[in-house]
Amino acid sequence: SFTLAIVGRPNVGKSTLFNRLVGKRLALVDDQPGVTRDLREGSGRLGPLRFTVIDTAGLEEATDESLPGRMRALTERAVDMADVCLFLIDARVGVTPTDRILGELLRKRAPQVILAANKAEGRKGEQGFYDAYELGLGEPLAISAEHGIGMDDLLRALEPVAERFEDATAIVDVDLDEIDDSVNEEGEGAILPPGRPIQIAVVGRPNAGKSTLVNAILGEDRLLTGPEAGITRDAIAVSVDWDGVPFRIFDTAGMRKKAKVQEKLEKLSVSDGLRAVRFAEVVVVLLDVQIPFESQDLRIADLAEREGRAVVVAVNKWDLEEEKSHKLNELREAFGRLLPQLRGAPMVMVSALTGKGLDRLRAAIVKAHSVWNARISTARLNRWLAGQIADHPPPAPGGRRIRLRYMTQVKTRPPTFVVFCSHPEGVPDDYKRFLVNGLRRDFDMPGTPIRLYLRAGE
Ligand code: GDP
């Protein structure tokens, strides 16, 4: 499922729309000032679609003087969490200078924008609706959040988004003809849209050194002391330029505790870890070298894999280790045994305390993120598949040979492939694993889950 951010200046009707989409299904509210009040999140529904909605709620209370900076910051945060932004303007007022500023921001930063002129019921909304074209964000929808008008158009605009983020298991039901190959040939090797930070979460058991690591990345003990030049910190994440690469690091309860926002937030710690994993693109599982692979570590690593996140394992406190090469072998063995589902994920030894190994950690994260986003052209995949079949043909249960006919990548984040074959049910799991491991090796994709589905097809 996907995340929709409702953005727009104050009073365009964001909250009304949020309430319409979410109803009472609010996921997490916290009335502690300055903590999570500024962004609201809920589970939204529209027709058959289910998605997460984020609303920049705090804006409605902003005073005019405080507005521009906060609006930008809040909107940026919402945009960075979203797969698609619904940009509202007020159809009765038309396009204001503030709308133009936000429109510009969205054009630069948002992965996808749907423009809607709200309060479009009746004649008064007409002019504003036509004005909206000038924002250069495509054809606006005319809606009324209050009266429920235009929700069918909104649904139609969201359907293709939902499709892109649908579970791959659902995607395998599409017809071969429907898979748009142009996307495969085009975006090959493309990494991330420029300027979008890599979103990471640092997870691990208490005292693994998460706060120390984040502080080391930030360069100083800034997590404790709040915002300073070059770093913006909010309740859920901190943005930082880590040696030239923009990152957003999602906070976990363990870190907040240190940031002295304790109390109530402690109670959120479990869902908080899950949240961090959900927001993150790359999950850094931080192990303590002296107590590695604790059950808590294994659970969260498994969760990250199941959620389709890229994973990098970092082993912290390496400075304490005396028998380094012996330990390394031990860790590799334990990794393979305890986390077979993370096969291929990089393991980096670090010392958050001394800063050793952080460059390699950063490189591993950047690499994992880029392969998580990778596209491999259908032509290359099919050349590769032919080679695999020649070297190691699929089994022939009962003498009936299974033909693997065609392969294509249907999705990224994580890379997801479909192989069309004569009898998908006859392909054993270990042959599927053989293909997945081969893909990982031959296309160099460490640190990302790889999904592969078989489907009947000529
Ligand atoms: P968190 O609960 O995961 O955030 O862990 P902290 O960052 O608070 O670290 C827990 C303890 O481990 C602190 O006493 C840190 O100083 C210590 N620590 C963290 N990283 C390292 C490291 O790389 N080496 C050593 N020797 N100690 C570390």
Image: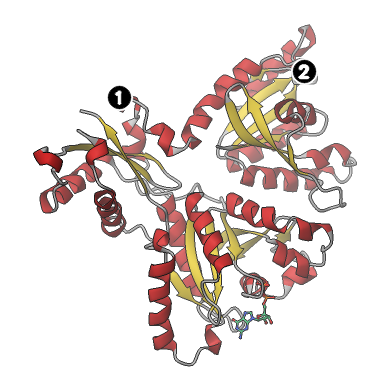
Residue type at numbered disc 1? Asp
Give the CA separation, mark 1 to mark 2: 40 Å
Quadrant in which ligand 1 is drawn: bottom right
Quarter of the picture containing the C terminus is top left
How is colour applied across the structure in the image? secondary structure
Quarter of the picture containing the N terminus is top right
> In the current view of this chain or complex, which residue is farthest to the left?
399
Left or right, 440 with reference to 193 = left
Residue 3's tag is none
**Mark earlier in primary sequence (1, 2):** 2
Q: Between 187 and 43, which is closer to the camera in this rendering?
A: 43
Left or right, 353 with reference to 182 = right
Q: Position of residue 234 (x, y in %)?
A: 75, 56
Q: Is residue 137 shown to the viewer in this render?
A: no
Residue type at numbered disc 2? Lys
- Indicate whether 312 appears above or below 153: below
Is the C-beta of the residue carrying label 2 under 8 Å from the nearest atom of ligand 1? no
Please name the residue that numbered disc 2 is placed on: 119
- Indicate whether 69 appears above or below 215: above
Left or right, 190 with reference to 114 = left
Please name the residue that numbered disc 1 is placed on: 177
Dot 1 lies on which element?
Answer: helix
Left or right, 104 with reference to 366 = right
Q: Position of residue 74 (x, y in %)?
A: 74, 45
Q: Are marks 1 and 2 in contact (CB under 8 Å)?
A: no
Q: Nearer the viewer, mark 1 or mark 2?
A: 1
